[in-house]
Amino acid sequence: AVSLSFPFQSLVMAFTLGTGVGMNTLLSRSLGEKNQDAVDRTAGTGIFLFLCSAILFCFVGIFGAAPFFRFQTENPNIIRYGTQYLRVCIGCCFGICFQMCGERLLQSTGRTDLSMIAQITGAVINMILDPILIFGLLGFPRLEVMGAAVATVSGQIIASILAFILNIRKNHEINLSLKLVRFDRHIAGQIFSVGFPSIIMQSIGSVMTFFLNNILISFTEAATAVFGAYFKIQSFIFMPVFGINSAIVPMIAYNHGARKLDRVRSIIKTSILIAMTIMTLGCILFEAIPEVLISLFSPTEEMVRVGLPAFRIIAVHFPVAGFCIMTMSACQALGKPMYTLISSLCRQLLALLPAAYLLSLTGRLELVWLCFPIAEVTAAVFSVIFLRRTYRTVLAD
């Protein structure tokens, strides 16, 4: 149930991450240009856009959760648990929306340590509440899957409150005021001109996961469980890379605004090297001990049988993915968001899903997992082309 809910949650993250990237880039560029008025108006408009996203998805989550699961499966337990989980997670999504907003405001001025504090606080609260609310410990009722959802949104809400407290008390480069929280068409247009490709890319990821789940479940429900387990474990590998990604976007935008092009090139090269190193280590981990990784989920024998080859095959693409993430983030920060969008479209819609479908026709589940390295190689080709074009235009001396 939780694995099948992932595409819906990804859709919410698509809007929050995309809006955050656009706001973050514009804030950093304005700070580099020493334009305080633009900084304050960008922050106010960004907060307003996050508020609108939260209201929209609250309604969608409450009323759309049940039909979403009925479309994917007829299993009544999956439908029941999944509906409970999504109605809480998406119905209370204002927590993750404002957590993302507060963290991006901190990151735009280089206060990534404070952003980290807010994020870790939310994660720790989530981990503490999970067993208590799932199993009904310490006098609390046994809520099972709904308990996991309540723990998640509780951590997000507390993290969002802490993030804004830190912004008000520590982030003096940005003047946060309720009177500035309003829609500014010009600022919103600039935010979405950079952030919209990220929204589309993340949304495409949601669509990809949804259809891939449907391909996998045609073999066995264990395959979707393996896919969900993989995503949870790989986040430990990808999150440091996404952390670097979050760091380089404002750094590149700021130095580009200040016309320090040598520093921009240095940031790009260093981030690619670090990202590929991290992802190579992650690949080695998945190849060497997949049985240990999958054992974290108390798997059935069928899940182990399906999961071991899946983990080894999928992990091959990790180093290439590190390169693609960094290069496309650099293009986006330098005002070339369409490059990122095109690369993502080619990777997920033109390569991954068609490859997964065609490989599924062989009737061999282990071959379906090859769609991941096939798609990443496709994305890498476009990433190289677009990075070279960006160097020749935006970063030309």
Image (tube, rainbow, N blue to C red):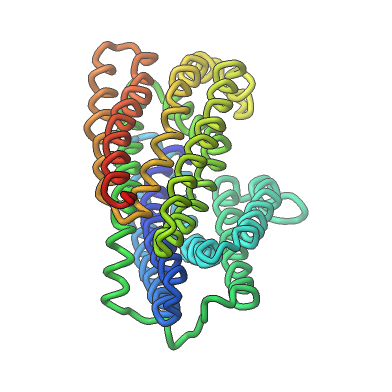
Judge from the rendering whether residue 225 lies leftward or rightward of residue 199; answer left or right: right
- Residue at x-position 53% and y-position 46%: 244
In the rendered image, the vertical position of residue 186 relative to residue 279, given as above or below: below
User: Horizontal and vertical percent for residue 345?
Assistant: 25, 40
In the rendered image, the vertical position of residue 76 relative to residue 150, given as above or below: above
Q: Is residue 84 visible?
A: no
- The image shows a total of numbered marks equal to 0
**Image quarter for residue 20?**
bottom left
User: Horizontal and vertical percent for residue 167?
Assistant: 59, 73
Foreground of the two, 19 or 61: 19
In the rendered image, the vertical position of residue 31 relative to residue 17, given as above or below: below
Foreground of the two, 210 or 208: 208
User: Horizontal and vertical percent for residue 281?
Assistant: 58, 26
Q: Is residue 234 visible?
A: yes
Judge from the rendering whether residue 353 lies leftward or rightward of residue 59; answer left or right: left
- Residue at x-position 45% and y-position 75%: 34
Foreground of the two, 130 or 175: 175
Hey, which residue is sitting farthest bottom in the picture?
179
- Residue at x-position 36% and y-position 15%: 365
- Residue at x-position 47% and y-position 33%: 228
